Structures are given as structure tokens and as C-alpha cells.
Amino acid sequence: MDHKHQRVALNDGHFIPVLGLGTSVPEKVPKSEAFKATKIAIEAGFRHIDSAYVYDVEEEVGMAIRSKIADGTVKREDIFYTSKLWSTFHKPDLVQSSLEKSLKKLQLDYVDLFLMHFPLPLQPGTQLLPRDEQGKLLFETVDLCDTWEAMEKCKDAGLTKSIGVSNFNCQHLEMILNKPGLKYKPVCNQVKKLLDFCKSKDIVLVAYGALGSSRSKWVDQSTPVLLDDPVLGALAKKHNRSPALIALRYQLQRGLVVLVSSFNEKRIKENMQVLRDFGLQGSCAVSFTCVHLSHAFAGQ
């Protein structure tokens, strides 16, 4: 399969693979699983690997990438690697050092995409989520435009090929896009909604949690499990595919770049099947309208 055909153009001339592996590890899962999953994913055909400073697995993920480069499976330029600026590093003088820390863990010379993880600056220090004595988060006063300018310098320094944002709403994006002297606009926004706005601004939308989120402390336990949705189940049965493949195909047909997380070898390989079986290079073997799935993704 020619992986170069399953990519979306970014507004800076680079390309991002439409299907990526998310490497956020649930609390009770050993970090070594990120190493195993990344290796399996690359062997299965994944070329887009998404991680972040706050995931605390970049050392393991970098080791997996380098091992697959060493054995000849891929070259460095075949891999599209994403890292993210954590909120405690929003001060302009901390941005580049944060990326350099990630590169040191990865033992790579550059990342392909560097995102501002959240538009919420937190007080710098040793704690990822600094809190006061009452348990309230300690925010920092930092202009997002100043942080963005520091990220632009990281791109100019060759530490990242592209820069973008994550979890930004329309107002946050407008702040960056209307910044005086803007050198590079965000190439993507990694969120769950905002598709129409991003398309109007030539910003690629990257969907994380495309198959639903793990049932961690960050997730409302009353939230329905996406893959158990009866609409997905009915379509999966009709097309002889798994609910996961139906969900992924729906998002790809909407023009999104999709991230999926799994530490199960069978599921990782199955997720890659969405590109093979549904033929993104030509006409789709299976096609269905967005209205069929609008119910299943309501509120996701």
C-alpha cells in the first residue's frame, strides 16, 4: 500500500497521515505497553504517531520508532510524529526547552508537528497540575499569542516541521489568526468538534478519542460507551465490519484526521484495515451518509 496517498495537505505545505496512533496510556497500564503498541502499529502500517509531553511515554515511543527505523521497516521521513506543549511551559522562554526535552526523550532530531496542548496556561514548576492548598488549579497569566510566537521560533529552528493547536475553540483560534505579525497560522486543531470553522480557515481538524475515551477518572462514567451504540452496531452488521471500523470510516469521510488508541495487537491491526478495505485511494467499497451516524456521535 502506498502510504503517501492516505494523507491530508496542511496549510504550510506538509502532509499529515489521515490515521494515527494515540499513545496516551491509562493509569493502570504499564508505560512499556506504549513501546509495544507503537512497534505493532508501525509494523501494521501506521505512519502517524501522536504523543505528548504530559503522556510521559515519549521515551518508550521514541525507542519503538527508532527500533523500526533500525530494522529497516521505515525511514525517519516515513513517520509523522506529533508532540505537544504542556500548559506549565506556556511562558515564551520555556517553550523551546520543553520541545527539546521531548526530543531528548525521543532521541529524534525533530518532530513533525508540535501542538499547544491546551489554551490554559498553568504555573510553571515540577507539578503537571499545580494546585493551591484548596486543591484549585494554579493558572498563569500568559498571552497565547506570545506562546504561539515562541512556537513559531521552534519551527524556524528546525525543531518541528509544523505547528498547531489542540482543544482550542473558535475564539482561541481567532486570537492566534488575528495576531499582529502572525508568521505561521496553525496547521491543525486537535479536538472533537469545530469542523466547519476549521475548514473555513484551512485548518485540518484532528479527532482524538475517535472510538470513545477509556473509562478513566477524566471521563464522566455516565457517558454512553460509543462502540455500544445501537446505530453503529446496526451499520456494522449490515456492512460486515466492526463498530470501530464504521466509526473510523465515518470520521474519515467527513474529512478529519483520526487518532485511535489501543494496546491490543488485534485491534491495532484491525484499525489499520479502515484504509485497506475501504480503499481511500479510489472509490469507497463501503459508503454511508453522515446522517446515519449523527445520532451515534451526538455529544461525543
Image: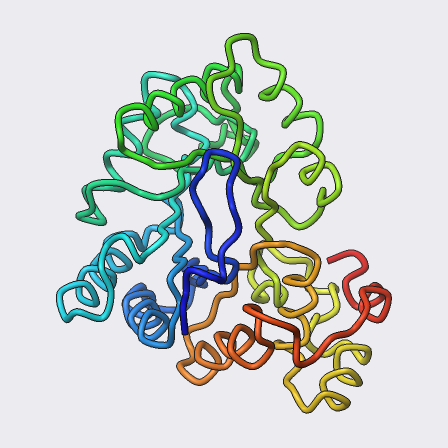
Looking at the image, residue 167 sits to the left or right of residue 74; the answer is: right
Q: Provide residue 246's location: percent of width, then percent of height.
A: 68, 76
Q: Please, is residue 178 above or below residue 87 in the view?
A: above
Q: Please, is residue 60 above or below residue 191 in the view?
A: below
Query: 203 or 5: nearer the eye?
Result: 5
Pick the quarter of the image with the C terminus: bottom right
Looking at the image, residue 60 sits to the left or right of residue 130; the answer is: left
Quadrant in the picture for residue 39: bottom left
Taking the spot 67% from the left edge, 38% from the top edge, the residue there is: 198
Q: Residue furthest top?
A: 180
Taking the spot 45% from the left edge, 63% from the top edge, the residue there is: 26
Looking at the image, residue 23 sits to the left or right of residue 246; the answer is: left
Query: 215 or 147: nearer the eye?
Result: 147
Q: Please, is residue 59 above or below residue 21 in the view?
A: above
Query: What colour scheme governs how the chains and residues are painted in the rendered image of this protein?
Result: rainbow
Query: 94 or 47: nearer the eye?
Result: 47
Query: 14 or 79: nearer the eye?
Result: 14
Pick the quarter of the image with the N terminus: bottom left
Q: Provide residue 231's location: percent of width, then percent of height.
A: 81, 77
Taking the spot 73% from the left edge, 36% from the top edge, the residue there is: 197
Q: Provide residue 38's location: percent of width, then percent of height.
A: 33, 67
Q: Provide residue 188's location: percent of width, then percent of height.
A: 55, 40
Taking the spot 80% from the left edge, 85% from the top edge, the residue there is: 234
